Amino acid sequence: QVQLVESGGGLVQAGGSLRLSCAASGRTFSRTNMGWFRQAPGKERGFVAAIRWSGGSTVYADSVKGRFTISRDNAGNTVYLQMSSQKSEGTAVYYCAAGAQAMDVFRSWLRWDKWGQGTQVTVSS
């Protein structure tokens, strides 16, 4: 079982950068696909990015492609989300997720087994 704790959220200006971290506990992290989602007030939880257990494949939401980068350190049991060129619509609670089984279901939050508590990101214009 994987337990997840996000950190790194905060206030960032539009156009700025921020890096989120998700520390995972559990012996299966290196064999677990990981993802990031975000949820703005009054909106559904939306897919941001995901990375396969090996780190060899990544997938991004169209809205963040080219601006965000997901990566992982299996030795350190951590997954990262580097966010650049932030936009005001990026204001949301960002959640780390674990456990979706295949890349073709990464975009659905229903397919992920474990979630962190979330970290708030606020983009000021």
Image (cartoon, rainbow, N blue to C red):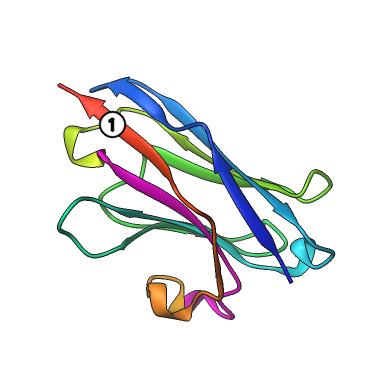
User: Residue at (35%, 35%) from the top-left corner?
Assistant: 121
- Please identify the quadrant where the C terminus is shown: top left
Quarter of the rendering containing residue 76:
top right
Q: Is residue 124 above or below residue 21?
A: above
Given residues 113 and 55, the one toward you in this image is: 113
Magenta-span inclusion, residue 103: yes
- Identify which amino acid the numbered label 1 is placed on: Thr
Q: Is residue 40 shown left or right of residue 108? A: left
User: Residue at (51%, 31%) from the top-left corner?
Assistant: 8
Task: Give residue 100's position: percent from left, percent from top.
Answer: 55, 76
Q: In the rendered structure, which segment of residues is drawn in magenta?
A: 91-104
Task: Give residue 122's position: percent from left, percent from top.
Answer: 28, 31
Question: According to the image, label 1 marks what residue?
Answer: 122
In this view, the residue farthest toward the front is: 117
User: Residue at (49%, 42%) from the top-left corner?
Assistant: 69
Per the image, label 1 sits on a secondary structure element best described as strand
How dense is the environment of label 1, judged by Cα within 10 Å: few (below 14), some, or many (20 and up)? many
Task: Give residue 58's position: percent from left, percent from top.
Answer: 53, 58
Task: Give residue 89's position: percent from left, percent from top.
Answer: 18, 41
